[in-house]
Image (cartoon, helix red, strand yellow):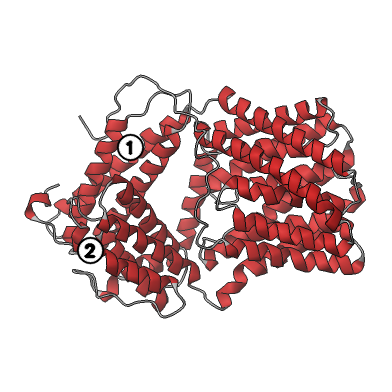
């Protein structure tokens, strides 16, 4: 039987966690970067509007300012293109919302448009794998704009404000490249070295999978960074050494790698000093480093065609992205209509709450709903305590919003609910820019919208199954088998070309990371056939044996005779 044969199994449902959902984690390595970026991107337009006495326009500039939250894990060359697309997508969603709001006062129509926009935004963010904070920011801006009083003649000016603020947010996100242009690549390389050190110290499935994903992410970061500068070439050499820790199936320290040395390299790479210069990996020559990055730069047109093809495939019938889009459409519409029926006049927060629930699978969506409800309910209490201070003066209101902006991004990596504690009062204070509202009415509406949105979102999760998640696993199994077969064909040649070996190893590594990602997502999905777990395990083990043989052929490692066979 082949490594990817699919065996039938009895279906089973994953458990929905209760304990640990609210547990705090260590903060992300670069938590302060999006936090500071969004504060700077928001402070300048907000203070400018304050000086002009037009704080009622803050909602429109905030739409552009929030774009500064995106792209912080990407190298600056890729980040520049990504944030431009984020700004254009944000302005497009805002335009639809504002035009709709200016043409109709029907709450039923506004809710329907809000649900459609949320589903489209979720689909595009998933298809492009844009990364955190994902679709929620888009949904927040467009849903809030739908329920803001609007005249058709005001729309161009308001969109212009959003676009101008978005342009400034772009400058904020790419500006650090002038000071440390290889910063994202250095951090990605350091994470790969740390993960490789963890695997070298304690070999096992979990540490190997984490290290493989980190190494793959480091290569993707380097290949997307553009011209192979001397610093990036040094980083590539470090990633090659991290790969050596993965290129064996022995039970002892992987490939003779020294965990302490890898950890030291990671610390120096993450720092501000020179990148460490490791000894050349066995069997490699200096000229080979940077070839992949150079080819990526020279063939960027082909790369764009492949990216478009992947994007269109993600939107095609049969894609696992589409059931999640149906969930979003159904849940957001249900949340909006139920909230409106219960007496909330502007139920945009119910739509946003439902949109925020939708994660890659049922288990994660369940956890996100619990976190969202808990964080929002605590957040309205924080708002009740802060609103007297915010109403002291317009400047106090601006400063409170900026503080909560920073707190939200600083805390959200510890746990989503903790970030929601800051997001909720920030969103409520933004409403104050257009005029004071009764605090109790804001608090009660927000609490009701939170409960309705989370309940409707979860109902749609269970009502709309994503059976295609298992299909993604089967596709990943097939792709892994093909990549492994291709690598073995190259290995079978008497004089394998160095570039062919490298390309085969890269393809197989990428397919193994995709297989693990697909299986992790599918494992938390309900209402689908059980996964071929034995086949996935066999494919991963066989793939890593082939990777070890490929690395041995390249001279990166020397395997003991007992482990040398494929």
Left or right for 502, reference 457: left
Nearer to the camera, 452 or 234: 452
User: Which residue is under mark 1?
Assistant: 477
Tell me residue 501's x, y (percent).
24, 58
- Mark 2 Cα within 10 Å, few/some/many (few <14, many 20+)? many
SS class, disc 1: helix
Name the residue at the front extreme: 385
Identify the residue shown where x is 81% and y is 35%.
110
Identify the residue shown where x is 77% and y is 64%.
164
Identify the residue shown where x is 61% and y is 30%.
326
Left or right for 504, reference 350: left
User: Which residue is under mark 2?
Assistant: 257
Alpha carbons under labels 2 and 1: distance apart: 30 Å
Tell me residue 79's x, y (percent).
56, 63
Tell me residue 145's x, y (percent).
80, 46
Identify the residue shown where x is 66% and y is 54%.
408
């Amino acid at each position: 039987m082949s490594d990817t044969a699919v065996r039938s199994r009895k279906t089973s449902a994953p458990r929905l966690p209760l304990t640990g959902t609210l547990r705090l984690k260590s903060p992300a390595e670069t938590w302060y970067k999006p936090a500071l970026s969004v504060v700077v991107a928001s402070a300048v337009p907000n203070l400018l509007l304050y000086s002009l006495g037009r704080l009622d326009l803050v909602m429109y500039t905030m739409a552009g300012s929030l774009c500064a939250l995106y792209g912080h894990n990407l190298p600056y060359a890729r980040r520049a293109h990504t944030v431009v697309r984020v700004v254009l997508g944000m302005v497009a969603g805002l335009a639809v919302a504002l035009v709709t709001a200016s043409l109709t006062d029907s709450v039923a129509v506004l809710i329907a448009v809000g649900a459609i926009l949320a589903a489209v935004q979720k689909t595009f963010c998933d298809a492009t794998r844009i990364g955190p904070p994902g679709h929620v920011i888009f949904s927040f801006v467009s849903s809030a704009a739908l329920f803001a009083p609007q005249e058709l003649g005001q729309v161009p000016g308001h969109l212009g404000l959003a676009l101008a603020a978005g342009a400034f947010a772009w400058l904020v996100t790419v500006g650090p490249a002038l000071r440390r242009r290889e910063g994202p690549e250095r951090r990605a390389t350091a994470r790969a070295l740390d993960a490789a050190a963890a695997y070298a110290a304690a070999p096992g499935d979990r540490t190997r999978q984490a290290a493989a994903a980190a190494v793959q992410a480091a290569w993707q970061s380097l290949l997307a960074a553009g011209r192979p500068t001397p610093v990036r070439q040094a980083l590539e050499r470090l990633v090659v050494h991290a790969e050596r820790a993965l290129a064996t199936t022995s039970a002892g320290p992987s490939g003779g790698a020294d965990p302490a040395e890898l950890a030291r390299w990671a610390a120096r790479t993450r720092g501000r000093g020179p990148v460490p210069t490791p000894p050349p990996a066995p069997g490699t020559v200096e000229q080979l480093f940077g070839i992949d990055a150079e080819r990526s730069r020279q063939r960027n047109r082909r790369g764009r065609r492949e990216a478009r093809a992947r994007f269109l495939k993600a939107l095609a019938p049969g894609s696992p992205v589409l059931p999640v889009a149906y969930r979003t459409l159904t849940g957001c519409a249900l949340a909006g209509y139920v909230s409106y029926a219960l007496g909330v006049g502007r139920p945009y927060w119910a739509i946003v709450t439902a949109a925020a629930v939708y994660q890659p699978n049922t288990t994660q969506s369940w956890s996100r709903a619990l976190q969202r409800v808990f964080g929002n309910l605590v957040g309205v209490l924080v708002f009740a305590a802060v609103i007297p201070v915010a109403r002291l003066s317009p400047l106090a209101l601006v400063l409170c919003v900026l503080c909560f902006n920073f707190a939200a991004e600083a805390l959200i990596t510890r746990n989503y609910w903790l970030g929601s504690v800051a997001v909720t009062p920030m969103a409520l204070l933004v409403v104050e820019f257009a005029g004071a509202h009764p605090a109790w009415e804001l608090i009660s509406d927000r609490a009701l919208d939170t409960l309705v949105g989370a309940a409707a979102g979860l109902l749609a999760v269970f009502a709309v199954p994503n059976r295609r998640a298992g299909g993604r696993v089967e596709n990943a199994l097939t792709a892994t088998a093909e990549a492994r077969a291709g690598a073995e064909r190259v290995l079978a040649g008497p004089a394998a070309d160095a570039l062919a070996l490298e390309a085969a190893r890269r393809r197989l590594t990428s397919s193994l990371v995709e297989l693990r990602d697909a299986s992790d997502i599918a494992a938390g999905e309900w209402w689908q056939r059980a996964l071929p777990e034995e086949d996935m395990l066999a494919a991963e083990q066989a793939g890593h044996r082939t990777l070890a043989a490929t690395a041995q052929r390249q001279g990166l490692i020397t395997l003991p005779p007992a482990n040398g066979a494929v």
